[in-house]
């Protein structure tokens, strides 16, 4: 059974980004995929210390919950991330998580031994949700995601931006948005399976 790794960095349980992520993942489950949802805010992780110890072997020396995450990303077949927009970009939880892949950057570029080989043809998807309707806030987050996906050898296969949603549960009042997330999940999985 193929596995979709889903990252939910919002600290808000049942928040808008998490709700849309679950709709996306529901489509994957309906198509026979296993979904592993990681609530990033629940992880006990420290920010990257820029110590460069990972330059030796591509492994982070910080012993925290990230050590359980790296193998999951290696073994999964696809990746989806959904982030709220906070102060014009992705939230701190997701950015801290991404920064901890400096070790993967070292493995790929300095050691030339990436943990996910490029020929694996892995794909990823990004969803972001913000209260303000200014497009550039989601674009800012997307630029970081593009760099992250490139670093971990995942091709960004699509993204959805949802703007104007702030209150807890606001997206649940908009069935069209939920249907859009579900349909995106369905199309994404079909694309991944096609290769």
Image: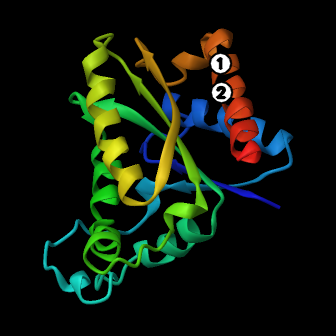
Q: Total marks drawn? A: 2
Residue farthest front in this picture: 119
Q: Quadrant of residue 144?
A: top left
Is 124 above or below relative to 89?
A: below
Q: Residue at x 68, y 12 (%)?
A: 175
Left or right of residue 194, residue 65 in this image: left
Q: Position of residue 10 (x, y in %)?
A: 43, 42
Report the colour scheme: rainbow
Q: Residue at x 36, y 58 (%)?
A: 151
Q: Which residue is under mark 2?
A: 184
Q: Position of residue 4 (x, y in %)?
A: 66, 53
Tell me the element at label 2. helix
Q: Residue at x 14, y 72 (%)?
A: 50
Left or right of residue 81, residue 6 in this image: right
Label for residue 137?
none
**Foreground: 77 or 120?**
120
Left or right of residue 129, residue 31 in this image: right
Marks 1 and 2 close (CB-CB < 8 Å): yes
Marks 1 and 2 sit apart, C-alpha to C-alpha, by 6 Å
Q: Residue at x 85, y 42 (%)?
A: 31
Left or right of residue 152, residue 102 in this image: left
Tell me the element at label 1. helix
Q: Which residue is under mark 1?
A: 180
Quarter occupied by the N terminus: bottom right
Q: Position of residue 162 (x, y in %)?
A: 46, 18
Q: Residues within 10 Å of mark 2 (few under 14, many from 20)?
A: many
Q: Residues within 10 Å of mark 1 (few under 14, many from 20)?
A: some
Q: Position of residue 130 (x, y in %)?
A: 37, 22
């Amino acid at each position: 059974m193929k596995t979709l790794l889903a990252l939910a960095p919002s600290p808000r349980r049942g928040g808008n980004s998490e709700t849309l992520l679950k709709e996306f993942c529901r489509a994957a489950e309906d198509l026979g995929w296993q979904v592993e949802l990681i609530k990033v805010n629940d992880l006990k992780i420290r920010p990257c210390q820029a110590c460069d110890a990972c330059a030796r072997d591509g492994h982070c020396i910080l012993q925290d919950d990230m050590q359980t995450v790296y193998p999951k990303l290696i073994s999964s077949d696809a990746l989806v991330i959904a982030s709220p927009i906070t102060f014009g970009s992705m939230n701190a939880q997701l950015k801290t998580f991404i920064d901890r892949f400096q070790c993967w950057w070292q493995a790929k570029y300095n050691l030339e031994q990436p943990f996910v080989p490029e020929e694996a043809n892995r794909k990823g998807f990004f969803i972001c949700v913000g209260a303000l309707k200014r497009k550039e806030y989601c674009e800012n987050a997307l630029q970081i995601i593009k760099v992250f996906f490139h670093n971990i050898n995942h091709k960004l296969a699509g993204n959805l931006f949802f703007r104007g949603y702030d209150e807890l549960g606001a997206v649940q009042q908009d069935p069209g948005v939920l249907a859009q997330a579900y349909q995106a999940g369905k199309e994404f999985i079909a694309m991944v399976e096609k290769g």
